[in-house]
Amino acid sequence: DSGVTQTPKHLITATGQRVTLRCSPRSGDLSVYWYQQSLDQGLQFLIQYYNGEERAKGNILERFSAQQFPDLHSELNLSSLELGDSALYFCASSVGRASSANVLTFGAGSRLTVL
Amino acid sequence: GDSVTQMEGPVTLSEEAFLTINCTYTATGYPSLFWYVQYPGEGLQLLLKATKADDKGSNKGFEATYRKETTSFHLEKGSVQVSDSAVYFCALKSRSNDYKLSFGAGTTVTVRA
């Protein structure tokens, strides 16, 4: 157990729907990161939050949004889902905001299937 | 921008064989380099890291040396076990990329008994 908790583990939904993925970071970690892992795109960085504030943005679609709450858990909202959004979504956390040696701890992932 | 290129798999080996997974990078400045491993059905785990040139990261019998002159960070293990079957990802972070962790495509390794 890495200490990063993601729910749900699996989710099956239909095109056009909206889902929310939840992440609780490791105790003491202030940064939360979201990554998408798909067969064709590999591991893509989506977004990072640090202590409630958006810190960095990657290849996140406009249909996707995220936030980090005062208790530091984070949610990734995916709307108007398309077949191509089917992927494994990972959350990771780290102690600091950003640094070269900052190590990320990953959760087990949420597998989203869009039918 | 920063990028990582790693050897494409899949790689299939017999137990006790020598494993090498090549990784090269492109980055401005001096990135930190990482190897992460993903076992079946699990999330990514940090395997080892190196933060400056000539550093050697090591863990669980795996080693990788940060080679600035060849911009490489190849992963090696002298004698693999069935339990080493996993997907291995090379990754980097640098100031020029705002310390975002950028991953290679991953290399699937299968070790047969």
Image (cartoon, coloured by chain):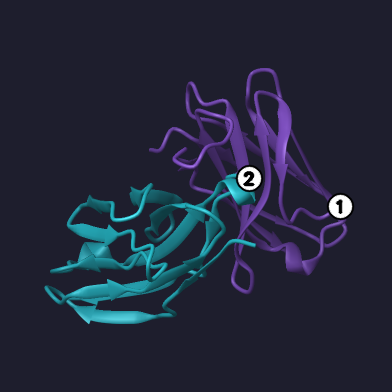
Chain colours: A purple, B cyan
Residue in front for this viewpoint, B72 or B59:
B72
| Residue A27, x across and y down, in percent | 47, 23
As helix, strand or loop, the secondary structure at mark 1 comes to: loop
Give the label on residue A62, or none: 1
Name which residue lies at 74% across and 34% down.
A54
Can residue B6 be seen at all in this image of the molecule?
Answer: yes
Seen at 20% across and 53% down, the residue is B60
Task: Specify the subunit that label 2 lies on.
Answer: B
Chain ID of residue with mark 1:
A
Q: Label 2 amino acid? A: Asp
Q: Is residue A100 left or right of residue A17?
A: left
Q: Nearer the viewer, residue B55 or A111?
A: B55
Residue B3, image x, y percentages: 56, 65
* Tag 1: amino acid: Glu
| Residue at left offset 74%, top offset 62% | A85
Density class for disc 1 (Cα within 10 Å; few <14, some 14-19, many ≥20) is: few
In the rendering, at what x and y percent does residue B93 appear?
A: 52, 50
Relative to residue B54, is residue B73 depicted above or below? below
- Relative depth, front residue between A35 and A53: A53
Q: Quadrant of the N terminus of chain A?
A: top left
Taking depth in this image into account, of A62 and B31 the one nearest to the observer is B31
Name the image quarter holding residue A115: bottom right
Badge number at residue A20: none
Left or right? Give the position of B50 relative to A81. left
Q: Is residue A68 visible?
A: no
The secondary element bearing badge 2 is classed as loop
Residue at 65% from the left image edge and 37% from the top image edge: A22
Q: Are marks 2 and 1 in contact (CB under 8 Å)?
A: no
Pointer 2: what residue?
B98
Camera-near label (2 vs 1) is 2
